[in-house]
């Protein structure tokens, strides 16, 4: 009897009195089949819009190796190769069955006019999981009964094996090699799911604490600091499009955000002649006496201050925000241990209430793509360091830039580059850095409203001429 016959008998819960002895070739072949079958399985389940991630290959390979290690721990040395080969081959059979079910389901879905309880996604998953688990436990028990019938009962041993395997695989920070367009990275593995859950709870609790979203209440000097910033603002120049900027360094725990705010605003000042048109809100212990903190209340005050000086139909508001981020929005962690957040819907509502029509919004944070849909329109340019499902990189102390800040401000926005040209250049650069460092792509996003892009053209020309003049 060979390993294929042995495994086939196990799949119908039949033990084998004289199981075959497998060698390295059988283990290797069956492992490759299991690995390849899993990839094809992912590809089919992903649906029409399949996205490939080379980093998922590491995760899938690690899952196979963990399965082998756990399998080897549940059987004596004499039969380890046979059990591992059989389990890998059985995994390949499982993938073939799932592929067939997936293809059949896709075809059947074409004939379904209205979903019911029996065709709802959650019901299908629950039923499939229960049926699969019962079958799998019976098949594994048949393998254990075949190779070591003298050990304790096979069913409890199979169940213990399943628990050990489940715990081991959940501990992996897994990510699929092939994923569909609707794949949510926030639920890709246990680590991401717990992180998102804890961030969500933290933001929710902070929002419910009296005054927790009001950084100004942390220090009575806030009104004076705000007044100093607002008093330094210059009136608009009549007869031209003016740009007023608000910069935010939102996190108190890392100094890279303050460094990036300073560097980014310097670059933007050269591009749009922002002298006298800048308000900065900073969450850093060292700046608590010199800059107003970045809280939601102070941001609202800053927007109101520039609105009073602007022609809200003609001028442009430039908002640059750099901090940590989550799927819920932009992090505002204030000195004193107060944590809050700025949700995309809240920022959109604030800007809409201001009446400022033309907006440039640049968000350097993880998951910053969540701001795209609420803010994008014909009169808005919005650029984010990542899409809504992924983190960005480089938020470390002693750095001057995050990956996004370095690529976009320090490199892309040089010379006569426009915002769109700088974004496209930065996106390419960031992808190269992430591939070099073996990181999951952050996938920076950009929306460039046609009406505002047209309005920016003369500003770019003026900026280029000013930079080329002898006085510069």
Image (tube, rainbow, N blue to C red):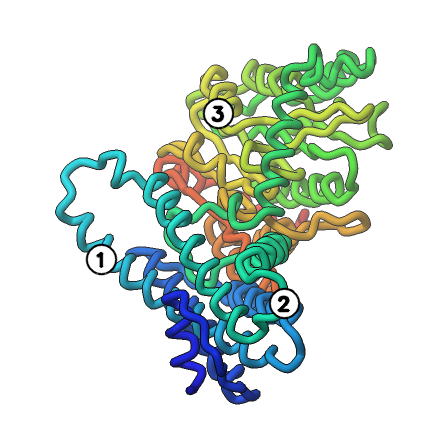
Q: Quadrant of the N terminus?
A: bottom left
Q: What residue do we see at 66% from left, 39% from top?
A: 324
In this view, the residue in front, 230 or 294, is: 294
Category of crowding for the residue at label 3, using alpha-carbon neighbours closer than 10 angstroms: few (below 14), some (14–19), many (at least 20) = some
* Residue 82 occupies quadrant: bottom right
State if disc 1 and disc 2 touch (CB < 8 Å). no
Q: Is residue 395 above or below residue 297?
A: below
The residue singled out by tag 2 in the image is 151
Q: Which mark is residue 95?
A: none
| Depth check, front residue: 210 or 303 | 210
Q: Nearer the viewer, mark 3 or mark 2?
A: 2
- Residue behind mark 3: 345
Q: Earlier in the sequence, mark 2 or mark 1?
A: 1
Measuring from the top left, give residue 62's x and y in whole percent: 59, 67
What residue is at 66 percent from the left and 75 percent from the top? 76
Task: Judge depth for marks 2 and 1 and give the one in front.
Answer: 2
Distance CA(mark 3)–CA(mark 1): 40 Å
Q: CA distance from mark 3 to mark 2?
A: 61 Å
């Amino acid at each position: 009897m060979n390993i294929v016959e042995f495994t086939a008998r196990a799949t119908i819960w039949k033990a084998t009195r004289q199981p075959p002895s497998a060698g390295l070739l059988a283990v290797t072949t069956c492992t490759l089949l299991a690995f390849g079958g899993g990839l094809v399985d992912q590809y089919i389940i992903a649906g029409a819009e399949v996205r490939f991630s080379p980093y998922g290959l590491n995760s899938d390979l690690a899952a196979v190796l963990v399965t082998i290690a756990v399998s080897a721990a549940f059987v004596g040395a004499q039969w380890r190769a046979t059990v591992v080969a059989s389990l890998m081959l059985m995994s390949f059979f499982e993938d073939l069955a799932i592929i067939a079910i997936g293809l059949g389901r896709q075809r059947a879905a074409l004939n379904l006019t209205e979903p019911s309880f029996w065709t709802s996604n959650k019901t299908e998953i629950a039923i499939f999981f229960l049926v699969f688990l019962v079958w799998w436990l019976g098949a594994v028990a048949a393998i254990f009964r075949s190779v070591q019938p003298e050990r304790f009962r096979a069913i409890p041993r199979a169940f213990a094996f399943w628990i050990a395997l489940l715990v081991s695989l959940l501990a992996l920070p897994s990510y699929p090699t092939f994923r569909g367009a609707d794949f949510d990275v926030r639920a890709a593995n246990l680590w991401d799911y717990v992180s998102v859950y804890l961030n969500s709870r933290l933001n929710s609790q902070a929002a419910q604490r009296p005054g927790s979203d009001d950084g100004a209440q942390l220090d009575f000097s806030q009104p004076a600091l705000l007044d100093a910033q607002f008093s330094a603002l210059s009136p608009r120049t009549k007869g031209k499009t003016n740009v007023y900027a608000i910069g935010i360094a939102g996190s108190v725990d890392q100094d890279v955000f303050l460094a990036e705010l300073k560097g980014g605003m310097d670059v933007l000042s050269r591009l749009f002649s922002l002298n006298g048109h800048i308000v900065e809100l900073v969450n850093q212990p060292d700046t608590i006496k010199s800059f107003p903190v970045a809280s939601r209340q102070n941001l609202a005050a800053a927007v109101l201050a520039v609105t009073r000086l602007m022609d809200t139909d003609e001028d442009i508001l430039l908002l640059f925000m750099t901090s940590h981020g989550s799927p819920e929005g932009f992090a505002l962690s204030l000195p004193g241990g107060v944590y809050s957040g700025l949700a995309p819907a809240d920022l959109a509502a604030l800007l809409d209430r201001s009446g400022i029509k033309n907006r440039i919004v640049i968000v350097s944070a993880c998951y910053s793509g969540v701001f795209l849909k609420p803010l994008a329109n014909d009169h808005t340019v919005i650029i984010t360091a990542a899409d809504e499902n992924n983190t960005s990189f480089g938020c470390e102390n002693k750095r001057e830039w995050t990956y996004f800040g370095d690529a976009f401000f320090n490199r892309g926005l040089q010379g006569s580059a426009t915002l769109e040209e700088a974004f496209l250049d930065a996106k390419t650069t960031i992808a190269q850095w992430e591939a070099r460092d073996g990181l999951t792509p952050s996938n920076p996003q950009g929306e460039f409203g046609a009406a505002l892009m047209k309005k920016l053209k003369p500003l770019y020309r003026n900026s280029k001429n000013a930079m080329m003049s002898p006085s510069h």
